[in-house]
Every structure is written in structure tokens, then in C-alpha cells.
Amino acid sequence: MAKPDPESHLLVAALARRGIAAELVPWDSAQPWASYRLVVVRTPWDYFARLEEFLGWARRTSTLTDFVNPFPVIEWNAHKAYLRELASVGVATVPTLWLARGAVDAATRLRERGWDEVVVKPAVSIGAIGALRSSASEPACLRHVEQLVTEGDVMIQPFVPSVAAVGEVSLIYFGGVFSHAIRKQPAPGDFRVQDMYGGTVHAHAPSSAEHALAAQALACVPSPTAYARIDLIEFDHKPALMEIELIEPELFLGAYELAADRFADVLQKRCAAGG
């Protein structure tokens, strides 16, 4: 993707202060992966468009060296169906209509939900790519759904007004331990919180309810993580999980003075332990 990496250099510098040499290399480049003590997946922003290729690389590389986040975590997180799994065990999420690739009954199923305004998005994507906010009755909405289901699985959710009003909250964890949090605010008139759409980042002190929900969600991840970002929104006057980001999240290392060092500490211990 065209967006530059805003923070990996901070992690590389923090590792250098600990005497650990690190380099940034593309996941699809010819590298002697087995020669690296640790491979950290950080910004493969094209993985969603090359999913099978990316997962194949991650599977192979994870057998050659210590690999984080672990392959089972990456595979689980690559498709947003994990949200369906979490909802089934009591994690508060946004109601979602799931459509499998090739679904022919999308219009009927969406009408049965009775939602006025919705957000339609691919089940495998990043950065709100492919997302559409629309009245559920608009012909353009159904055309968008029909196009997406020819390409892959689709998820449709009711539009949550709090996203436009106050944005999303992100809680960041290193080694399973909470580090810091931020609030992402969309530009006026938009619902997408990413900076490429004009979104802005603000300091945030999580509530006890936000901490509890984020911890509950993280506990459902298949394996322990070196890094994780839990995205929450306000739904029905309480926190709800929007996403768990375990593959390529921006971790807002520059937003908190100790963040890069905390991440580096986790990776240093991992290197010392040999995985």
C-alpha cells in the first residue's frame, strides 16, 4: 500500500539500544529466513489482497525460525469470522450479517434484519478498504454487496452513530500486558477513523469496562501474542469489540513515550529465551 510506515523505525531504534540488530524487509522478498533469530510480522499491508500467498509464506517461515505473532494467531485473525466466534462465547460485538462468497440471498437476508443504515465490508480487508456506509434500502448498497460477494465473504453491520461522533478506542498490548491506549476520531462527515481518510489520534484513558472487554477478547486469541491492538466502540451505551488487530496494526508507538521500549523488551526476552 502507498501509506508509509510511521513507526517501525522507532522499534528498530529501541532494539538497537538493547544491542539487537533489526532490519525491515518485505515479507515476499527472498530472505534467508532461517538465519534470523526472530521474525516479527509488522506491516504486510498487502496481505489481504494476496491472502493465500501470505499465509503460505507465514506457515513456511514459522517452521524455520521463531515467528511472531505465531502462525495460528495470524491465520485466525486474517478473516474477520473470528468476531462471530467471539460473539458466540459472550464477547460483546456489533451485530453482524455474514454472507459467504457467492451468496444469492443477500437482499432478502439484509431486509430481514430491518437495519436502516449499514456498513458493508469484506471479511478479509484492512483500513476500511471496500467499506461502504449506506442506507440499507439504497440500490447502490445492494450492488456493492453483490459485487463483494463475487470476490469473497462479506459482513454487514448496522451503522453505529458513536463511531462518527467519538470514534474508536484502541488498547495496545505487548506480551499480553496493556501498554497504552488512543482514540481515533474520524473527519467530520466521515465514519472511517484511519488517517488516510482524515482521521485523527487523541490520548485516551480506558474505562474499567473497556479494560475488561479488551482483556476478555485477548484471552480468546488462540496463542499468546507479542503485540495486539484491541479496537472498541460504544454500542448500546457500553463498549463493544470492533476488531482484534494481530497482523499489521499501527501500534501508535509514537503516541506514548515508553511504547517502543515496551515492545522491544518483549522481543528481547523472546530472543533471549530462543522462542
Image (tube, helix red, strand yellow):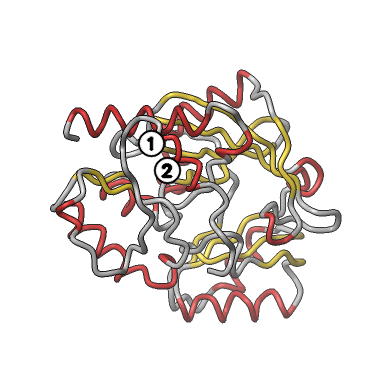
Which residue: 28% across, 27% down?
A: 269
Q: Residue at x 70, y 43 (%)?
A: 184
Q: Residue at x 76, y 51 (%)?
A: 186
User: In the depicted view, which residue is nearer to us: 248 or 15?
Assistant: 15
Q: Are marks 2 and 1 in contact (CB under 8 Å)?
A: yes
Q: Residue at x 32, y 46 (%)?
A: 73
Residue 85: horizontal and vertical position, in percent? 40, 45
On the picture, is 268 further left or further right than 275? right
Residue of label 2: 12
Category of crowding for the residue at label 1, using alpha-carbon neighbours closer than 10 angstroms: few (below 14), some (14–19), many (at least 20): many
Residue identified by numbered label 1: 15
Q: Measuring from the top left, give residue 176's x and y in whole percent.
A: 39, 28
Give the class, few, some or many, for how many residues have Cα within 10 Å of label 2's Cα (few <14, many ≥20).
some
Q: Which mark is residue 37?
A: none
- Residue at mark 2 to residue at mark 1: CA–CA distance: 5 Å
Q: Which of the 4 quarters of the picture holds residue 102?
A: bottom left
| Mark 2 residue type | Val
Closer-to-camera residue (116/224): 224
Q: Amino acid at mark 1?
A: Leu
Image location of residue 217, percent across then percent down: 45, 34
Secondary structure type for disc 2: helix
Above or below for 239 versus 244: above
Picture layout, residue 186 above or below residue 135 = above
